[in-house]
Amino acid sequence: MIHLGGAVIQAVYIVTILLVMLGIMRLRTPATARSGNLLAAFGMLLALLVTAITVPLANWLLMVLMLLAGATVGTWAARAVRMTAMPQMVALFNAMGGGAAALVALGVSEGIVLGGGLPPPMVSIPGSFTVLIGAISLSGSTVAFLKLQELIKGRPTVFPGQRWLQAALVAVALAAAVLAVIGRPWGAALPLVVLAGVATVLGILLVLPVGGADMPVIISLLNSLTGLAAAATGFVLGNAVLIVAGSLVGASGTILTQLMSRAMHRPIGHVLFGAFRTGPATAATSQEGEVRETGSEEVATMVAYAGRVVIVPGYGLAVARAQQQVRDLMVALEGRGVDVRFGIHPVAGRMPGHMNVLLAEADVPYDRLYEMDAINPEFARTDVVLVIGANDVTNPAARNNPESPIYGMPILEVDQAKTVIVLKRSMASGFAGVDNPLFSMAKTRMLFGDAKDSLTALLAALKEVS
């Protein structure tokens, strides 16, 4: 153990706080996001090192081992996990953050109880809050991961009496929290354990009714809960870094959740409880209407002589890792004088900004990316739209079918364009589990196959068009 003065430790913590705040500020634009991420990571590294070297030797050795293990897993995950699986990794890391906060609060309270005392209100109150929020985030984020990884169905899952069960669990959780604070008649430890168990079940029941189309919103909400749990843990430990960093994450996550809900015209209450009004989701039915298939040569002729082409990327683009081919197509078409734009839905992919990051990797200029509100008025003046692996975010049923599970969700109105080309592996439904009537419209042509292979063939055919 190394003895550092309290002033030195607090100075390092202040530097950490400033670096984290500066890093978050630089995440506002793709151009500065990389440096912002590095600044925030370096700040947290400083805090971890100072914490590690100021604890007793036995704990210090254990902490170093845990730091090495965590750094190894984190480095491997950052390099090995594909962009298509990034939302799942975010959900898992978020679950770990919530679980860690809950365990710390439980450990501190248990240590005080074993020492023969009762946690003071400055520990028991934020400790109870941490256990409640952290456990909800742990189990809820885990269910989100399972849905994103398609290990369980992405459609809303509800069962009879689910709302009453949730209400009963909330009542039990509140009672356990009160008992943990007052410390009677069983002390603080047992009520906190009960609170952790009940909150874990609540987290599962919170996310099960959320459909796939709303998963980006729920991930943002769970991220804000983990931030709040970390901030409360800071009060339990008397750690300023946790308080500030957790508050920043909680506030930013809450704001992002509100912005996404407003952009989708789906209040957070509808996201969380909409499935209870509509009942259990049914499986997607077979696609109705005639589906017209096309080939790369026909598509190449269409886009070569078009005045404007809008490319709409989706999760299928990410799965195929075809962002470079998309950029090459943009360059080739612009060389022919075609006006090429990208239409980006707020929740395209599986997390906010998913498509922006993919296209930035391929050096697609930022000024070619148009958000939903900016591009929708342009579709009526667009000759050809290339929908690459996007499904739910282009589904007209969200606009004109009140019976659809995604009704009311704003979409990219690609059906207003003169011609729509959909690049898709098959006629399988999207993540929300509903059919897309766009595919059987008279103006739509389906180009089946892996997006990367289809775009490569399209580029080759485009070179042959005189």
Image (cartoon, grey):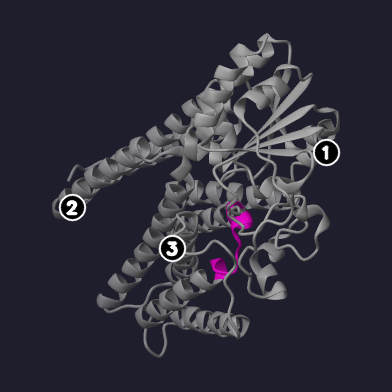
Label 2 secondary element: helix
Q: Quick one: SS at disc 1? A: helix
Residue 23 versus residue 187 in the image, above or below: above
User: Image point 39% across, 56% down: which residue?
Assistant: 96
From the viewer's perspective, is 297 left or right of 362? right
* Mark 2 vs mark 1, CA separation in Å: 61 Å
> Which of pointers 1 and 3 indicates the residue nearer the eye?
1
Residue 416: give its label. Answer: 1
Q: Position of residue 296 (x, y in %)?
A: 61, 27
State the residue at coordinates (45%, 50%). Answer: 88
Instruction: Give the labeled residue for mark 2.
Output: 62
Whether residues under marks 1 and 3 lie with C-beta atoms below 8 angstroms apart, the answer is no
Residue 16 percent across, percent down from the top left: 42, 37
Res 30 quadrant in image: top right
Q: Is residue 23 visible?
A: yes
Q: Which of the marked residues, 1 or 3, is nearer the chain's N terminus? A: 3
Residue at 44% in and 45% down: 85
Left or right position of 199 against 311: left
Residue type pointed to by label 3: Leu
Residue beneath label 3, please?
A: 138
Amino acid type at mark 2: Leu
Q: Earlier in the sequence, mark 2 or mark 1?
A: 2
Residue 281 vs 463, above or below: the answer is below
- Mark-to-mark CA distance, 2 and 3: 24 Å
Q: Is residue 368 magenta?
A: no
| Residue 104: image location, x then y, percent | 35, 62
Nearer the N terminus, badge 2 or badge 3? Answer: 2
| Residues shaded magenta | 206-216
> Residue flagged by tag 1: what amino acid is it?
Gln
Residue density around tag 2, few if under 14, some if 14–19, many if 20 or more, within 10 Å = few
Quadrant housing residue 379: top right
Q: Are marks 2 and 1 in contact (CB under 8 Å)?
A: no
